[in-house]
Image (cartoon, rainbow, N blue to C red):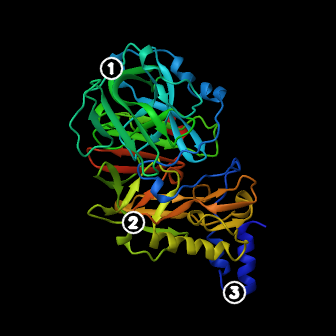
Amino acid sequence: MPFFFRLIFKGLEENHILDYQMAITLLPLRIRASLLIIIFALTCPKECTSHSRLTLRTKTQESSKIKIGYLHSKSTPASRLDNLWTVSHVTPIPNPAAFLANISIGNPPVPQLLLIDTGSDLTWIQCLPCKCYPQTIPFFHPSRSSTYRNASCESAPHAMPQIFRDEKTGNCLYHLRYRDFSNTRGILAEEKLTFQTSDDGLISKQNIVFGCGQDNSGFTKYSGVLGLGPGTFSIVTRNFGSKFSYCFGSLTNPTYPHNILILGNGAKIEGDPTPLQIFQDRYYLDLQAISFGEKLLDIEPEIFQRYRSQGGTVIDTGCSPTILAREAYETLSEEIDFLLGEVLRRVKDWDQYTNPCYEGNLKLDLYGFPVVTFHFAGGAELALDVESLFVSSESGDSFCLAMTMNTFDDMSVIGAMAQQNYNVGYNLRTMKVYFQRTDCEIIDS
């Protein structure tokens, strides 16, 4: 029996959960019919806000070729760049929740699939020869590119990554270690990157600084990371001015063709704005409250604020789950467990970071479940429906809350999973982020 009806009957029998009027408020939410049953590898809080552990399942070479096919389309003269959007169509990966941008590098261009990461600055890929983890598309070989150059060692003492000069070779070396202890190290270099344009052509940008990764660990399957953070080595601040946007559809629908990343002046800066702050190369938002259905949860707003270098709320597409500071997580999870625990059996022995878990079918048993809404300064909201709140087991007979509690520090993180079905626009000049719930086909048309 679907959750909505089971909850009503339970409330009528025991008269302590909900009355009819309250239960009816749960009805508007519906589960997407196309939802696939997948397993979501949630990570502990220390694995995000720079990067999330990448335990990606095998992605076939054939499917990768389909996704990067646009790189062989018509070319676009550089003189037309100002009148076009620089875009990349995006591939969703459900395990863990991540979105990959299709970009090519070098001359001749070698297509790459890069994790879109607003939580770090450096764009890097695996370069041969190297100590490489397996990936599903060809590795980049810098000696075969006519546009590859070593980059100079710039003075950037507070930037990610660490850089230093190798006196023996003269190369500028970098080392970037993420919070989950995955890392990449190699040569800081310059290359030509090729992007799609809004008229389905191609445009190239020369001399983009990137990390040529020669010793990489803790990642799987795809080529590297596209760093969209606000720091010294970000391609946003170096090469695309002050604007970018992305529209993410469902992570469980890999055939949806309209997920899109837009860099530069063509970015879709639409919807409801909220102030943006930059601190230690991270994007901070002013999260003020969380509601569960029509109920505003009793969480002190100070829980989400940053004090000096502690706490705060970061928006990070490189992190899979949403992570909340302890008090906020406990309050929200208790509300959810109060409803579900009365009508569904709890699953025991799950990892503490992915509790609570329940026996049941995510698609069938959560019909009518209330939306969780994040309320930001300025009136912007981010609404998390069932698809953004829960994740199913591989067998489809149980599911867990797709949030974690931060036991590492007081930081909260708005991860990739929470940003499904939204266009998110960044304007670094006005220092605002915009949220617009939409079908990405409208943005991509």
Residue highlighted by disc 1: 149
Residue highlighted by disc 3: 15
Label 1 close to label 3 by CB (< 8 Å): no
Q: Residue 53 location, x and y as percent?
A: 52, 48
Residue highlighted by disc 2: 410
Q: Residue 98 location, x and y as percent?
A: 54, 44
User: Is residue 357 positioned above or below 74 on the image?
Assistant: below
Q: Name the residue rendered at 44%, 57% in the picture.
A: 413
Q: In this view, does 330 lie to the left or right of 243?
A: right
Q: What element carries label 1?
A: strand
Query: Hey, which residue is sitting farthest left in the picture?
Result: 155
User: Is residue 404 positioned above or below 16 on the image?
Assistant: above
Q: In this view, does 165 lie to the left or right of 32?
A: left
Q: Is residue 336 left or right of residue 179?
A: right
Kindly identify the amino acid type of the residue bearing the numbered disc 2.
Asp
Judging depth in this view, the residue of 57 and 168 nearest the camera is 168
Q: Please tell me which of labels 3 and 2 falls first in the chain.
A: 3
Kindly identify the amino acid type of the residue bearing the numbered disc 1.
Arg
Kindly identify the amino acid type of the residue bearing the numbered disc 3.
Asn
Q: Residue 429 location, x and y as percent?
A: 26, 44
Q: Is mark 2 on a helix, strand or loop?
A: loop
Judging depth in this view, the residue of 93 and 409 nearest the camera is 409
Q: Inspect this view and state whether residue 107 appears.
A: no
Q: What element carries label 3?
A: loop
Q: Name the residue rendered at 24%, 31% in the picture.
A: 153
Q: Which of marks 1 and 3 is in front?
A: 1
